[in-house]
Amino acid sequence: MKDKSQDLLLCAGHRERLRQNFLDDKLAKYEILELLLSYAIPRKDVRPLSRMLYKKFGGMYQILGASVAELMSVPGMGQNTAIFIKVIQKIMLEGYKSEASSQPIFHNQAMFDNYCKLMLGSKHVEEMHVLYLDVNRQLLLDDTHSVGTLDWTAVHPREIVRKALELQSKFVVLVHNHPKNNTSFSTQDIEITNKIRTMLQDVDIILDNHYIVSGGILYSITGSPFFK
C-alpha cells in the first residue's frame, strides 16, 4: 500500500507540473495530449499511453480524427477515454462551424486550414465535402457530398448545383482528401472541378476553390497550371 501511495503522490506531482507548464505555455506536443488524458484517466500514469498514441497515429490531427475502435486498439485506451478524445474533436469542429457561420470563412486562413485537416486528415478513404457559402462567404452548410474508397469518391455536379440553389448560396468550396498522401490534383480532379465551376457559373454561383487534404497539409487547386 505504501508503494502505491507513493506512486499516486508522484503522479499527482507530475500532473501539477504539467498544468503549470501548460499555463506557462511550455508543454511539448506529447505532453499536451498527456495532460488531456490525465482528466479522462485520473489515477494512472498516462505518459506511456500518450507516447503510444503518437507512435501509432503520427500526430494530433490523426489522433483526434481516429475512430473510437482505432483508438481502443491502443493498449490502455478504454472506450470512455476514446469517446473523450472524440468529444474534443467534435467541439473543435463545431466551434469552427459556428465561427464560419458568423464571419467570412477565410477571415482566418489558419483556422480554415486546421478545420479541413481536423475533418479529413485521418480518413482512410476519400471523402468529398462541399462548403456552401452566402454572399459574404459565411458558411451555410458543410455537406458530406460522398464517401468513397482509398483513391476515389463519387462527385455529382448536378446535385451540387441543385443544393447551392436551394440554399441560395453565392460561393461554393470543394474539399476532399487523398489518404495515400498524394499531394497533386489528379486529371479527374481538375476535370470535375472545371465542370462544376462551369455549371455553377451558368446559374450565377462562383466556385471559390477546391482543396486537398493530404499528408497533413492543405493544398489549393489554384496552384495547378491545368486549372483555368
Image (cartoon, helix red, strand yellow):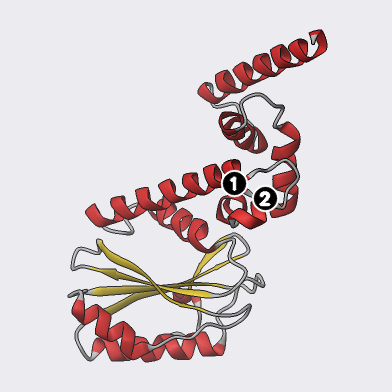
The amino acid type of the residue labelled 2 equals Met
Q: For mark 1, what is the residue?
A: 82
Seen in the picture, residue 33 relative to 130 is either above or below; the reply is: above
Q: Residue at the spot x=62%, y=31% of the render?
A: 41
Seen in the picture, residue 78 relative to 125 is either above or below; the reply is: above
Residue 89 at x, y = what percent?
48, 49
Seen in the picture, residue 148 relative to 47 is either above or below; the reply is: below
Residue 107 at x, y = what percent?
31, 54
Position of the N terminus, as image quadrant, is top right
The amino acid type of the residue labelled 1 equals Ala
Residue 131 at x, y = what percent?
34, 69
Residue 57 at x, y = what percent?
69, 53
Relative placement, left or right, of 50 versus 194 is right
Residue 72: mark in rendering:
2
Q: Residue at the spot x=65%, y=43% of the render?
A: 78
Q: Of helix, strand and loop, which one carries label 1? A: helix
Tag 2: Cα neighbours inside 10 Å, few (<14), some, or many (≥20)? some
Q: Residue at the spot x=50%, y=83% of the render?
A: 225
Residue contact between numbered discs 1 and 2, judged by CB atoms under 8 Å: yes
Relative placement, left or right, of 126 versus 197 is right
Q: Of helix, strand and loop, which one carries label 2? A: helix
Relative placement, left or right, of 188 versus 62 is left
Name the quadrant containing residue 135.
bottom left
Relative placement, left or right, of 90 versus 14 is left
Seen in the picture, residue 25 relative to 147 is either above or below; the reply is: above
Q: Residue at the spot x=59%, y=46% of the render?
A: 82
User: Residue most toward the top?
Assistant: 2
Instruction: First in sequence, mark 1 or 2: give its number.
Output: 2
Residue 58 visible? The answer is: no
